[in-house]
Image (cartoon, coloured by chain):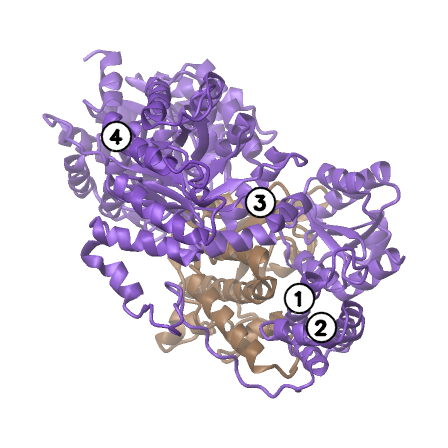
């Protein structure tokens, strides 16, 4: 089975989210700065080309490698190693894997701004972060929908580099999603993704609802992208 | 047809060549696990690979493609050697008894500089090893495919041409918007890669054949070689846990038929295609003849995202401003390495209507080659205009055009035997357009016939080297009218003579020399430009920022018919007037809106402080100029700007300012400092800097936001910042610090994986420049971590870095 690319709409990124990434805590802004932030955020969202790939793999087994727990998945060479992911996915019967990016256009503009307008670069960067997080929400919503079809329930996202899930998971994870070909994501020897506004993550699929994730639609990050909600149901059964 | 005839005919464009279809999706159907390196199957399960090849041969494919898409040393790692994989892969392909085996080369998987961290030369080395392995293993040709980055495609193509004699086909992958992930268009790819010597260019992967067809058709008029298409079998859809591609063999062949009708001669398939798709194409080719193609007779130059093509009768503008000759600020910028001024000139020229930018870094005391490469890389990030590489040193030209992601214009060769021998081969090897100056060992001929004779010599050399005539532009060299009033006529006659006696060749001219030594030069320049255009000039090297010059170009384009129905002229000149008092508004720019009328103090000192606190750079220049009317530079800095900045720093510390406010204030203060420095007498201690600080993001890391903030703030406090950029080699840091005896270096790293590069840089600094203190910062760093990597200081943010700099560099 090959991976399939999806396009996402992240226009729902809110100014407040961007401001939070900038460390905003209610400071009074001049009208000039206020307008500048709006303008840069708008440009960033217009530059974004949010796309992603998700695949769901069944858990094939759990074992140990170099003294650390490891989760093996069927149909892929991807393995998830470390205590933190082992705890995060305890009891999971399948794992959704996602890679999303807002595209090289954002990266090109960030590079341009770094040379001509560092103030705009900072704002653009925060907007790009907000946008790629929204794209990850959208990809997660696709996994939630697939889980629902199988009568399963999703946990929360977990990315390589968090806890002790090593960054060295990235090469195989990206290859498993054919992310180079489908999304244009490249990986440096330091395991840095380009475009830098890209996210990879895994999500556990469980037989019972998870108290920590998707507990209510109101606070759910996937809400704007949820096909279940649009069809009048929820992922909680 | 015999073995060799089919390929030879295809290379000549006289016959078709049918490639195979997908390998990856075929292997997935046979149980390849996601994320597994498919290339290793050549070693572990050769029968399976041979089976896929054999099915394509049975379907009628002339060429099978080896299973080596990702078989480069970086991707294979310790799993297998490049040589083992290519040897096994070619053997698998041969086992299927195809007419030809194409060695497959895919992207490295890494992003090249300047957007990424892989150096062009390192990418070249990865490819060169694959090429040597495939050549030794007995492949018949190369196919470089699924490229998204023109620079990477160029590195791979050069690697083949310089390490093998086999034919090489290059295809790139495009998105629905008709661009690659990095923004390259089909026209730019076709022009650049065919000029660089690809034996075929085209498109693979990307989309279904219906969507690839219009894109590949856009390549046809621009590729001086056969054109190739290997589309996907439409879009994949997941149905009941299975992935299915939505375009079947019949529909696929139908879309390919449209491509053949347009002139495509090499076809096959990519993701999702099967032997049935290839069989359908084989049936389609039976009894067909290649369609006739018409190539454009245009001078072409291309940046990675933009093609400039001049058909006969069209005129082009080359911006001349990025050249230190006679320009104090440009000299300073090139010497100091602070290229803000260069970048500003580039953007201003683009806005003013330049189509190509001349880039000259010729100063005796700098490393011209290194500065040229860095300038090209920076200019590529801020403008899409193609570049004209301008140097008298062939080694500098070669270094710049080799890795340039596009088709550059070289300025220049001349009629001297030595110059012809050095420069013409560079233009030919790298597929560049070339400017030829009409001077030789005897100097610049005084007469038109003398200049024509030199031009003949140059064109004989470019003809012999295989450079198309439309890619050669002869510069008949403008001389000052003030010293010889017959010169202008001789130049105009020479332009006419070159155009009529050397058909196909173009002309170019640096115009402004004509007025040297005379008053009100813009008027003479403009008049001469008009006369030169009338004489047949194709490319004018001018300062497009001079309104009068662009007026001549824009109006000439109406008179020559290039500006069809005078659309551009009417749009941009309808409101122009020579009436007294009528302010000419620059083309394409809206009148600046008046600044929002916020209440500002009338006292200039108070106003300047308020503007820094408000972060408003625009009115800052005027306020500081007023301050300087009643105060000296020392007062302006120590009593106005620095206290305001200190207040900004306090507010940032206590949380009443957040980051964009801090930066906007820094920007406003910078505008103020620029006014003070410009007004200060040379040697004025108050306006002189407080000392040099080197800053950079360490090797392997491309996050530069934090570093840029630090730079802004340090500049504000009067330090001379040498910004080495991002992903900087430890050696470059050490060399700079050593050579300039810099006393403080600021290093930034954002990833745990790049912190070791920070430690390495510090170690090298200790060894080579023990006097230099090091301050480090970045998201992953802590005071403990900073100590561990051997830094002298840890700074949690930019304001703290500024304090540390004050402390270290205190007089």
User: Which x, y percent locates residue B191?
Assistant: 33, 36
Q: CA distance from mark 1 to mark 3?
A: 23 Å
- Left or right, B619 with respect to B107, comes to right
Q: Are marks 4 and 2 in contact (CB under 8 Å)?
A: no
> Is residue B239 positioned above or below A127 on the image?
above
> Is residue A206 positioned above or below B330 on the image?
below
Q: Dividing the image into 4 quarters, which one contains the N terminus of chain B? A: top left
| Marks 4 and 2, the one that precedes in the sequence | 4
Q: Which mark is residue B628?
A: 2
Q: CA distance from mark 1 to mark 4?
A: 51 Å
Q: Are marks 1 and 2 in contact (CB under 8 Å)?
A: yes
Q: Which residue is mark 1?
A: B675
Identify the chain of the residue marked 2, using the numbered disc in the image: B
- Secondary structure of residue under mark 2: helix
| Marks 2 and 3, the one that precedes in the sequence | 3
Q: CA distance from mark 2 to mark 3?
A: 29 Å
Q: Colour of chain A?
A: brown
């Amino acid at each position: 089975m090959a991976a399939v690319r999806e396009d996402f709409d992240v226009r729902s990124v809110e100014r407040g989210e961007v401001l939070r990434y900038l460390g905003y805590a209610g400071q009074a802004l001049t009208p000039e700065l206020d307008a500048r932030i709006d303008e840069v955020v708008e440009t960033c969202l217009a530059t974004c080309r949010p796309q992603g790939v998700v695949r769901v793999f069944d858990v094939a087994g759990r074992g140990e490698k170099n003294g650390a727990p490891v989760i093996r998945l069927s149909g892929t060479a991807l393995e998830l190693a470390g205590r933190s992911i082992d705890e995060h996915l305890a009891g999971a019967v399948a794992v959704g894997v996602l890679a999303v990016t807002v595209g090289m256009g954002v990266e090109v503009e960030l590079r341009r701004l770094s040379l001509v307008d560092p103030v705009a670069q900072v704002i653009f960067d925060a907007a790009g972060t907000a946008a790629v997080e929204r794209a990850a929400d959208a990809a997660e919503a696709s996994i939630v929908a697939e889980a629902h079809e199988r009568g399963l329930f999703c946990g929360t996202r977990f990315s390589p580099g968090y806890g002790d899930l090593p960054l060295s998971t990235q090469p195989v994870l990206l290859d498993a999603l054919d992310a180079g070909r489908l999304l244009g994501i490249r990986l440096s020897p330091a395991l840095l993704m380009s475009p830098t506004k890209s996210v990879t993550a895994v999500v556990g699929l469980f037989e019972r609802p998870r108290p920590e994730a998707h507990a209510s639609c109101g606070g759910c990050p996937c809400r704007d992208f949820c096909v279940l909600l649009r069809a009048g149901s929820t992922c909680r059964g | 047809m015999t073995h060799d005839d089919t390929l030879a005919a295809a290379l000549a464009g006289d016959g078709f060549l049918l490639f195979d279809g997908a390998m990856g999706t075929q292997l997935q159907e046979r149980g390849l696990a996601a994320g597994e390196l498919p290339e290793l199957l050549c070693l572990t399960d050769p029968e399976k690979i041979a089976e896929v090849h054999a099915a394509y041969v049975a379907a009628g494919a002339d060429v099978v493609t080896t299973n080596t898409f990702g078989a480069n040393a970086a991707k294979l790692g310790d799993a297998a050697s490049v040589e083992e994989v290519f040897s096994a892969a070619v053997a698998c392909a041969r086992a299927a008894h195809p007419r030809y085996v194409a060695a497959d080369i895919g992207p490295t998987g890494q992003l090249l500089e300047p957007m990424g961290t892989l150096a062009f030369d390192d990418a070249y080395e990865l490819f060169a090893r694959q090429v040597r392995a495939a050549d030794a293993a007995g492949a018949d040709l190369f196919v470089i495919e699924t490229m998204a980055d023109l620079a990477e495609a160029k590195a791979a193509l050069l690697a083949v041409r310089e390490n093998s004699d086999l034919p090489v086909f290059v295809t790139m992958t495009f998105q629905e918007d008709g661009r690659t992930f990095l923004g390259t268009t089909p026209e730019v790819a076709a022009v650049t890669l065919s000029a660089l010597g690809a034996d075929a260019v085209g498109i693979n992967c990307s989309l279904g054949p219906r969507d690839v067809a219009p894109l590949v058709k856009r390549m046809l008029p621009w590729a001086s070689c056969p054109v190739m298409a290997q589309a996907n079998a439409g879009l994949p859809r997941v149905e009941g846990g299975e992935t299915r591609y939505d375009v079947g063999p019949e529909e696929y062949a139908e879309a390919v038929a449209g491509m053949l009708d347009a002139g495509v001669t090499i076809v096959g398939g990519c993701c999702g295609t099967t032997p049935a798709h290839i069989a359908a194409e084989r049936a389609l080719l039976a009894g067909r003849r290649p369609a006739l193609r018409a190539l454009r007779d245009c001078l072409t130059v291309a940046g990675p995202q933009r093609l400039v093509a001049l058909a006969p009768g069209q005129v082009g503008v080359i911006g001349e401003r990025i050249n230190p000759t006679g320009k104090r600020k440009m000299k300073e910028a090139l010497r100091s390495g602070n290229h803000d001024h260069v970048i500003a000139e580039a953007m201003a020229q683009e806005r003013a209507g330049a189509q190509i930018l001349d880039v000259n870094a010729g100063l005796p005391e700098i490393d011209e080659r290194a500065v040229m490469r860095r300038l090209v890389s920076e200019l590529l990030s801020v403008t899409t205009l193609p570049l004209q590489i301008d140097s008298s040193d062939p080694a500098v030209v070669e270094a710049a055009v080799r890795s340039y992601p596009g088709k550059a214009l070289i300025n220049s060769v001349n009629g001297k035997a030595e110059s012809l021998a050095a420069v013409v081969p560079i233009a030919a090897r790298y597929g560049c357009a070339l400017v030829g100056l009409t001077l030789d060992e005897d100097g610049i001929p005084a007469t038109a016939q003398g200049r024509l004779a030199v031009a003949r010599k140059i064109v004989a050399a470019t003809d012999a080297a295989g450079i198309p005539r439309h890619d050669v532009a002869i510069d008949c060299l403008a001389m000052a009218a003030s010293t010889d009033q017959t010169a202008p006529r001789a130049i105009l006659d020479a332009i006419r003579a070159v155009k009529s006696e050397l058909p196909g060749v173009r002309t170019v001219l640096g115009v402004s020399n004509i007025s040297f030594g005379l008053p009100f030069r813009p008027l003479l320049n403009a008049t001469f430009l008009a006369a030169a255009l009338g004489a047949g000039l194709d490319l004018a090297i001018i300062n497009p920022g001079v309104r009068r010059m662009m007026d001549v170009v824009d109006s000439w384009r109406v008179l020559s018919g290039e500006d069809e129905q005078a659309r551009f002229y009417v749009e941009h000149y309808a409101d122009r007037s020579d009436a007294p008092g009528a302010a000419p508004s620059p083309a394409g720019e809206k009148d600046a809106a008046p600044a929002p009328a916020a209440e500002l103090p009338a006292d200039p000192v108070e106003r300047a402080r308020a503007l820094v606190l408000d972060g408003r750079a625009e009115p800052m220049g005027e306020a500081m100029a007023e301050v300087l009317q009643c105060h000296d530079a020392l007062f302006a800095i120590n009593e106005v700007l620095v206290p305001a900045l200190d207040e900004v720093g306090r507010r940032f510390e206590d949380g009443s300012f957040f980051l964009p406010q801090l930066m906007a204030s820094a920007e406003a203060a910078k505008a103020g400092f620029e006014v003070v420095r410009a007004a200060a007498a040379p040697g004025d201690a108050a306006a002189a800097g407080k000392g040099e600080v080197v800053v950079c993001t360490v090797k392997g890391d491309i996050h530069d936001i934090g570093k840029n903030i630090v730079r802004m703030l340090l500049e504000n406090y009067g330090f001379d910042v040498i910004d080495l950029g991002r992903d900087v080699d430890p050696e470059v840091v050490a060399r700079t610090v050593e050579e300039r005896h810099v006393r403080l270096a600021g290093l930034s790293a954002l990833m745990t994986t790049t912190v070791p590069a920070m430690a390495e840089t510090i170690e090298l600094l200790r060894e080579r420049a023990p006097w230099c203190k090091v301050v480090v910062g970045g998201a992953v760093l802590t005071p403990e971590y900073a100590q561990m990597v051997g830094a002298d200081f840890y700074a949690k943010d930019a304001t703290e870095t500024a304090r540390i700099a004050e402390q270290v560099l205190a007089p």
